[in-house]
Amino acid sequence: MNLFDLIKATITCGGSAFVIYNWPAIGTYLLIGLLTLLWLSYAYRTVAKLRRR
């Protein structure tokens, strides 16, 4: 991890914490949506990898 990655992670975590703390309903929906997209991307990669075999 270089300094630029550390700065990006700090800003992302700080921004998400700010949104979730100030607007809990919106933050919850955004967090659930983000985790769903992340899960779907991993599932898609896994299925694509299994099909290549």
Image (spheres, grey):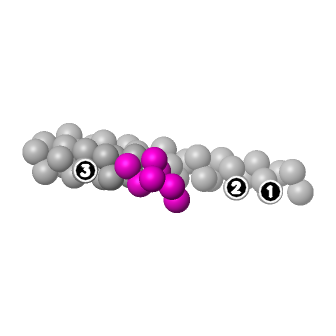
Q: Nearer the viewer, mark 3 or mark 1?
A: 3
* Residue 26 belongs to the span the image colors magenta: no
Majority secondary structure of magenta residues: helix
Q: How crowded is mark 3: few (under 14 residues within 10 Å), some or many (20 or more)?
A: few
The residue positioned 33% from the left and 47% from the top of the image is 12
Element type at marker 2? Answer: helix
Residue 45 horizontal/vertical position (percent): 69, 50
Q: Name the residue under label 3.
A: 14
Q: Name the residue under label 1.
A: 50
Residue 48 horizontal/vertical position (percent): 76, 48
* Residue 6 belongs to the span the image colors magenta: yes
Amino acid type of disc 1?
A: Leu
Residue 40 horizontal/vertical position (percent): 55, 48
> Looking at the image, do the residues carrying marks 1 and 2 touch, with CB atoms under 8 Å apart?
yes
Amino acid type of disc 3?
A: Gly
Q: Nearer the viewer, mark 3 or mark 2?
A: 3
Q: Is residue 1 left or right of residue 28?
A: right
The residue positioned 52% from the left and 59% from the top of the image is 1
Q: Can residue 31 be seen in this view?
A: no
Q: What stretch is highlighted in magenta?
A: 1-7
Amino acid type of disc 2?
A: Thr
Q: Mark 2 points at which residue?
A: 46
Relative to 27, say whether 1 is above or below: below
The residue positioned 60% from the left and 53% from the top of the image is 42
Q: Residue 17 carries which label?
A: none
Cα distance between the residues tagged 1 and 2:
6 Å
Cα distance between the residues tagged 3 and 2:
31 Å
Residue 46 horizontal/vertical position (percent): 70, 55
Q: In this view, does 9 lie to the left or right of 14?
A: right
Q: In this view, does 6 lie to the left or right of 51?
A: left
Cα distance between the residues tagged 3 and 1:
37 Å
